[in-house]
Image (cartoon, coloured by chain):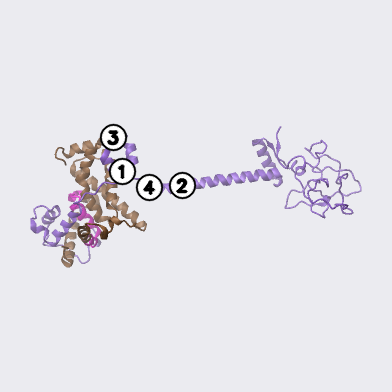
Chain colours: A purple, B brown
Amino acid sequence: MSASNDAPDEMTSDPLIDDAYVERLLRRRGLGADGDRDPAGSFVAAIADLGRSTPAPTGALAVLLAEGFDPALEPSAAASLEEPSRSALRARPRRRAGFRLGVRILAGTGIAVVGLATAASAGVLPAPVQERVSGVLEATTPFTFPSVRTSAPNAPAVTPPGSSPGRTAPEDGRRAPDPATDVPRTTRPTTPTVELPAVVPAPDEVPGPPAAPGRSELRPGQRGGPSEQPPGPSERAPGRDRSPGARGGSQLVPPGLVAKR
Amino acid sequence: MTAAHGFDEVLAAARLGQAWALTALYRSYAGAVAGYVRARSPAEPDDLVSEIFTSVFTSLDRFSGDEADFRGWLFTIAQRRVVDDLRRRSRRVDTTAYEPADDARQVASAEQDSLDRMGEQWVRRVLERLVPDQREVLLLRILGDLTVEQVAGLVGKSPGAVKALQRRGLVAAEKIVRAEGVPL
């Protein structure tokens, strides 16, 4: 025992109280009526009075005292009767937080996968990523996704008003269309080779407001038209359908998904 | 223990889950445990006493010993529960809903009730002015009726240290009572 446990104003010993007297006082035996009259005796008696009344049992204890319990079922009965331990109570919020975190991770992963698949089906991913994602998705789903080789013909290109369809530059860092593979060309020896859009739809395929009556959508000097093809060597883009009307892909094949056969 | 059964018989029946034996144990010891709880943790003492006895009754198979050992075991559990309860309460703000039954102005026996509470409050006031170790030793010795050795084991001190604590606690209490007087 350290001295710090003692009250500062307290005497270290009291000759009036020896161990035998203390023992009798605390056990409240052999003191007689005078024992309760001295201050220490009154204090001990008052403490003992605190334990005179028996409280009414509450909750699970009331049930136990009324019905008892089956010792064969004691472990489970005890578990149901005992209040949950403090460690168990502390662990509950941790388990809930872990569950919530797991749900968030799953939801985030799902959103990322769907987003990646959507981007891959639109063919807007960078070439190396597009190749890999298309490969993975084609291997795991019944759909065909555009790859670097096939994405350009299927991706519809919107030609801004006033710009030449033959001179549309790729936007937003997308893969630059490969004139050798992406777009079929007619032989026009006098026309220099220019960069072509991913898809050059026919004028009647280009979405937009209907032309005013008697007014051509084509400007003077602008190439394109129902009978014109973009300049370039006459090649069929790899993977493109030969069937009539399949040219331009955007109007026949929905951009992206094609069911595997 | 009871008129017809000794402690060992009652304990054996309580281990088998017999309601009469559980009730006999509760009647024998609940008052002392309740007094200890009231002196240490006055908020909702009855609920805490019920929790203590539920815990004791559902783990009787782990106890072995005689009646004195049972008292020691019972108060060990009670002391731990009280300490847990005090820690739990210290971490949160206590808010007590108004209960008309607890309002002394509306209870028929308000006078007697307030007298009882005065005595209880006086004891608690004196106890609060003692050093915590002295208070714990005196409560376990008086209400638990435990021996010096049992208390020493429970509070983790030597029997000599427990004797010194109880003596100094009584001397300090005597001074306080002399200074303040005894109620009624």
Q: What element does badge 2 sit on?
A: helix
Task: Indicate the position of residue B113 as horizontal and vertical percent values.
Answer: 22, 57
Cα distance in 3D space between marks 2 and 3: 34 Å
Q: Is A114 left or right of A146, judged from the image as shown? A: left
Q: Are marks 2 and 1 on the same chain?
A: yes
Q: Are marks 4 and 3 on the same chain?
A: yes
Would you call the spot at circle 3 few (<14 residues within 10 Å), some (14-19), or many (20 or more)? some
Residue at 83% of width from left, 42% of height from top? A184
Looking at the rendered image, the disc whose residue lies closer to the viewer, 2 or 1, is 1
Name which residue type carries label 4.
Ser
Residue closer to the observer: A77 or A180: A77
Query: Which residue is tagged 4?
Result: A87
Looking at the rendered image, the disc whose residue lies closer to the viewer, 2 or 4, is 2
Subunit of label 3: A
Query: Mark 4 and mark 2 in contact (Cβ < 8 Å)?
Result: no
Mark 4 or mark 1: whose residue is earlier in sequence? 1
Mark 2 or mark 3: whose residue is earlier in sequence? 3
Query: Magenta segment, which residues?
Result: B124-150
Query: Which residue is tagged 2?
Result: A96
Query: Which residue is tagged 1?
Result: A60
State whether residue A103 is above or below residue B126.
above
Q: Residue furthest right?
A: A190
Cα distance in 3D space between marks 2 and 1: 27 Å
Q: Inspect the magenta stretch and tell me whether residue B140 lies in it.
A: yes
